[in-house]
Image: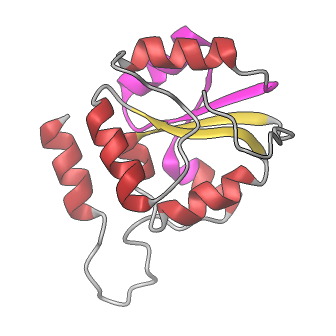
Amino acid sequence: MSVPADGDRSGEMTLAFELAAIREFADPETVFADAREWSRYVGVVANDTDAVAAFVAERDVQQDFDLGDRDIWLNMKGIRESSDAPRHVFVGTTPEDRRIADATGWEFRRPAEVADAAGWSLAGSDGGSGSPDPGLLARLWARISG
């Protein structure tokens, strides 16, 4: 894990988003910014660490997790073991994500659950304006490439 320059880690949780899950939010940058207000560590995980690095760079968000070239199982275990936060929440979308959370000691939540609790919008929840879903292509790509 990396620590911000100011060293402030006063939040109550470590919050990890699986790559497909963070892509379900209308504004991932806002999700990260808001989550930083009440989380010690925030980041994105996936088996495809190159895709995570590209997403983080494209969105210009600060990734607190150093994923290396390990698979998601090892990363989740390592993050859990190295985080001193009292609560660990993994936001995922699949039964496999739930298995990872259960096996590595994380609480599992779906994007809709955390969006509702935090007041975040999901991609495509534009109130019926008729505009295309900006996250559709990303979700389709994640499904066929992941």
Q: Could you say where residue 24 lies in the image, as x and y percent from the top left? A: 40, 56
Direction from residue 124 to residue 104 in the image, left or right = right
Residue 23 is at least partly visible in this image: no
Direction from residue 90 to residue 54 in the image, left or right = left
Residue furthest left in the image? 144
Task: Please determine whether, in this image, residue 125 is positioned above or below residue 130.
Answer: above
To which quarter of the image does residue 18 belong?
Answer: top left
Residue furthest front in the image? 5
**Quarter of the rendering occupied by the N terminus:** top right
Residue at (53, 20) in percent of width and height: 101
Task: Please determine whether, in this image, residue 87 is positioned above or below residue 115.
Answer: above
What span is colored magenta in the figure? 85-113
Residue at (46, 59) in percent of width and height: 60
Residue 120 is at least partly visible in this image: yes
**Quarter of the rendering occupied by the C terminus:** top left
To which quarter of the image does residue 51 belong?
Answer: top left
Direction from residue 7 to residue 57 in the image, left or right = left
Q: Is residue 86 magenta?
A: yes
Residue furthest right in the image? 10
